[in-house]
Image: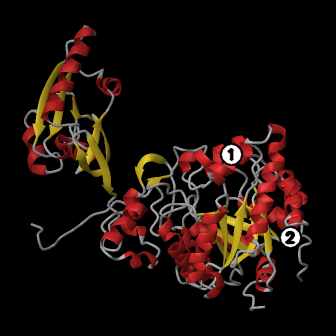
Amino acid sequence: MTETKTPSKLEKILRSGHLAVTSECGPPRGTDPTAITKKAEMIKDHVDAINITDNQTSVTRLCSLASCIHLKLMGLEPVLQMVTRDRNRTAIQSDILGAASFDIFNVLCLSGDHQAFGDNPKGQNVFDLDSMQLIQTVRYMRDEGKFLGGDEINRPPRMFVGAAANPFADPFEIRVPRLAKKIAAGVEFIQTQCIYNVEKFELWMKLARDRGLHEKVFILAGVTPFKSAGMAKYMKNRVPGMDVPDEVVKRMSGVPKDKQPEEGLKICIETIQRLKECEGVKGFHVMAIEWEEKVPEIVEKSGLYPRPKIE
Amino acid sequence: MIVAKQKEIEEIIEEIKDYNKILIAGCNECVTVCEAGGKKEVAVLASALRMYFMNQGKDVKIDEVTLERQCDHEYLEEIRKMIDQYDVVLSLACGVGVQFLAEKYISTPIVPGVDTCFMGVTEERGVWSERCQACGQCILARTAGICPVSRCAKRLLNGPCGGSTKGKCEIDKELDCAWQLIIDRLKELGRLDDYEQLTPIKDWSTERAGGPRKVVREDVRQ
């Protein structure tokens, strides 16, 4: 096991050579904490860490940090997702300190969807930093123990630093260089965009391996089960940067409506099983959007259960 | 150039309807090129307003003038002798010209007739698009001559984001992804390897964030 740099359980699992399993919870559009704790309760025994999304698709929700604290209070391992869309460098550093003060040990650095998609399309965006620069910022705060302004941090944050990668966005030719760039910025784990085009993902991994990148960062392959053929079509046509091959849509449409959820789960499990064999994949990020109750089944049927016990 | 577009006539009327002597002031520079506030647009707008007031049964005097520029003292001085004949000036210059008029002629109300949009180019007649946001610290040498500050919807200095699809931006299928353009041009220049250089955190203090800006050149100052 390579030496860990933080107290993160996710880091320990990855460095000890286990395939990691993460999942995510979207916070509610209100103040009821049970919306988070109930979802977490459903999946907690089947995953190593739980991402909390940060106003995903720019729709205002209960904040990621408070949601992470709810998980922490349940004794679980949160991954704080943080977008640069809504915060300047002061707020970013401040929130990182806030999270670290609750011993939140994982952060996922993102730029965030444009606000045009959300409930405040007339609002300002910030983008004082981009996702690469956010990675650099957290690493600097952790490793140098300093603020961006140069002052010392009393008890620096100890966070395992992650980012997203989308092997399917355009242009494809820079998708691996972009991964290399995130690694150069200091990223330690990657959670990918949902994978439906498995062959393209495998090509991306091969190109990453050709450069030895799979040994410099832990790559968690992202999967999302389709609940219906309609969802598959929506993801294919409406979600930017998503690659859903026609044959996958056809497979979903080819079964009766009441069997589609089952087919969606099957596709998801097959994807995980196939990618377990893909060199460089170090775990899975299971994003069961508003379908958290199916995470245990996916994890079990993919042969990823029980989860390792790490102290 | 500074690109502007004329306001809806209803909005203009709302602002000037209570005045009786109106001077419409065009500008011969950028707003002429983007066909929002030059001599021709002044004339067309003046006719429309005359028609409106006539239909309302109101006797309103509407005169026209187009200055060489509204962002320079010397041209603004040209209307000093006549400005007191009017109880409002409707300026079709960009926001810069409107303000400079207001600063100079303190007791005359000045109303904007255009919305100032951006600094940009004429792609073709009738199509103008943004190129610069005056961040005060040009990075074009590093981005193959294409500006991610003004042309990426997220101003990403290390783009593209995951929303770039078939060369287009996630917010609008008609909008080019700036980072696709940068990458294409880096390729043309044989410099695609430069893509992997991390662009450091930007100093935004030279941009809007740093407060109103000023350039002072002692060597040319009189």
How far apart are labels 1 and 2 at the CA level? 28 Å
Q: Going by the image, does A245 lie left or right of A181?
A: right
Query: Are the residues under marks 1 and 2 on the same chain?
Result: yes
Q: Is mark 1 on a helix, strand or loop?
A: helix
Q: Is residue A182 above or below residue A145?
A: above
Query: In the structure shown, which secondary structural element does the residue marked by tag 2 occupy?
Result: loop
Q: Position of residue B120 (x, y in %)?
A: 27, 52
Q: Confirm whether residue A205 shows in the render.
A: yes
Q: Quadrant of residue B104?
A: top left
Is A265 left or right of B33, judged from the image as shown?
Answer: right
Q: What residue type is labelled 2?
A: Leu
Quadrant position of residue B57: top left
Question: Which x, y percent locates residue A260?
Answer: 80, 44
| Chain under callout 1 | A
Q: Where is residue B17 in the image (x, y as percent from the top left)?
A: 30, 21
Q: Quadrant of the N terminus of chain A?
A: bottom right
* Frontmost residue, B17 versus A289: A289
Picture residue at 35% right of the left edge, 71% below the top: B186
Q: In this view, does B56 lie above or below A111?
A: above
Residue that numbered label 2 is attached to: A304
Q: In the depicted view, which residue is nearer to us: B7 or A168?
A: A168
Please tell me whether mark 1 or mark 2 is closer to you in this view: 1
Can residue A50 be seen by looking at this rendering? no
- Residue behind mark 1: A250
